């Protein structure tokens, strides 16, 4: 049976190394790696241990736990296998399992959806940078926007594989980036260059000051379960 390697670390830390996946709990995070060497590097940093665990179909296990979730006033997140209709007045969005971020169950994705429904208007031009599963791109289109999503990960469900530097300056009314702070730092100039308002997420409450230094004070800031999203 195939194996993976798990390291238990403190919650809500900034991960600056590649890993196969993360399970977030209130008391600790479980970080998974494909090789022992990668796991050992993480374990040494956090004075933790490497645990060998038997592989399972994480995607299937996660889907089995999913149930429909109302988000904001307009969205209805539902597993693909759930065949019920969304409540009247709500837009159904399918949760997307896979190896890229944005399934719909994470607080940053849900905060972005709430801010999207309040700030994206019919015909708005929207760019979703680091789109992952494309759930925020699809949400913007469902609100009547003309949205394009990009990601550097070939496994992402996007309009094109690439980064923000491939998009035209000043071409957008709203730019979404649900990415951790390390990437926001790297692409800050490109995000500002694209024009319009910025809908940013993937940072922690204690990092709000740095995000404000990069992009200005937010017009609106929301935090939930240790994560923040802001409209700048």
Image (cartoon, helix red, strand yellow):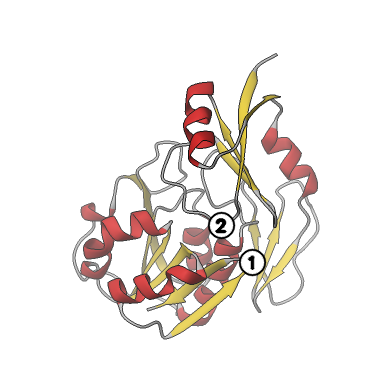
From this viewpoint, which residue is outermost toward the top?
1
Q: Is residue 127 left or right of residue 23?
A: left
The residue nearer to you, when weighing 1 against 162, is 1
Please identify, in this view, whether the residue under mark 2 or under mark 1 is nearer the observer: 2
Q: Quadrant of residue 63?
A: top right
Q: Quadrant of the C terminus?
A: bottom left
Tag 2 and tag 1, C-beta contact below 8 Å? no
Residue 62, image quadrant: top right
Whether residue 227 appears in this view of the structure is: yes
In the rendered image, which residue does mark 2 sit on?
12
Specify the quadrant that holds the N terminus. Answer: top right
In primary-sequence order, the first of circles 2 and 1 is 2
Residue found at x 70% / y 30% = 57
Q: Mark 1 packing: few (<14 Cα in 10 Å), some, or many (20+)? A: few
The percent position of residue 23, horizontal first and vertical second, equals 65, 45
Badge 2: residue crowd in 10 Å (few <14, some 14–19, many ≥20)? some
Residue located beneath label 1 in the image: 225
Residue farthest bottom in this picture: 219
């Amino acid at each position: 049976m195939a194996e993976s390697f798990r390291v238990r670390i403190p919650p809500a830390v900034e991960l600056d190394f590649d890993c196969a996946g993360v399970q977030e709990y209130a008391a600790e995070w479980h970080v998974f790696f494909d090789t022992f060497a990668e796991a050992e590097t993480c374990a040494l940093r956090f004075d933790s241990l490497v645990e060998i665990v038997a592989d399972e179909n994480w995607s299937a296990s996660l889907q089995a736990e999913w149930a429909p979730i109302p988000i904001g006033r307009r969205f209805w997140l539902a597993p693909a296998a759930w065949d019920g209709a969304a409540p009247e007045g709500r837009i159904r969005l399918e949760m997307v399992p896979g190896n890229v971020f944005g399934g719909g169950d994470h607080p940053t994705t849900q905060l972005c959806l709430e801010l999207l429904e309040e700030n994206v208007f019919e015909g708005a031009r929207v760019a979703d940078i680091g789109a992952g599963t494309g759930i925020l791109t699809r949400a913007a289109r469902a609100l009547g926007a003309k949205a394009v999503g990009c990601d550097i990960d070939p496994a992402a469900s996007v309009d094109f594989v690439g980064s923000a530097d491939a998009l035209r300056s000043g071409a957008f009314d709203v730019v979404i980036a649900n990415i951790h702070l390390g990437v926001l730092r790297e692409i800050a100039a490109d995000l500002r260059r694209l024009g319009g308002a910025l809908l940013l997420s993937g940072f922690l409450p204690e990092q709000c000051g740095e995000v404000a230094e990069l992009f200005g004070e937010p017009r609106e800031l929301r935090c939930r379960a240790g994560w923040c999203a802001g409209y700048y």
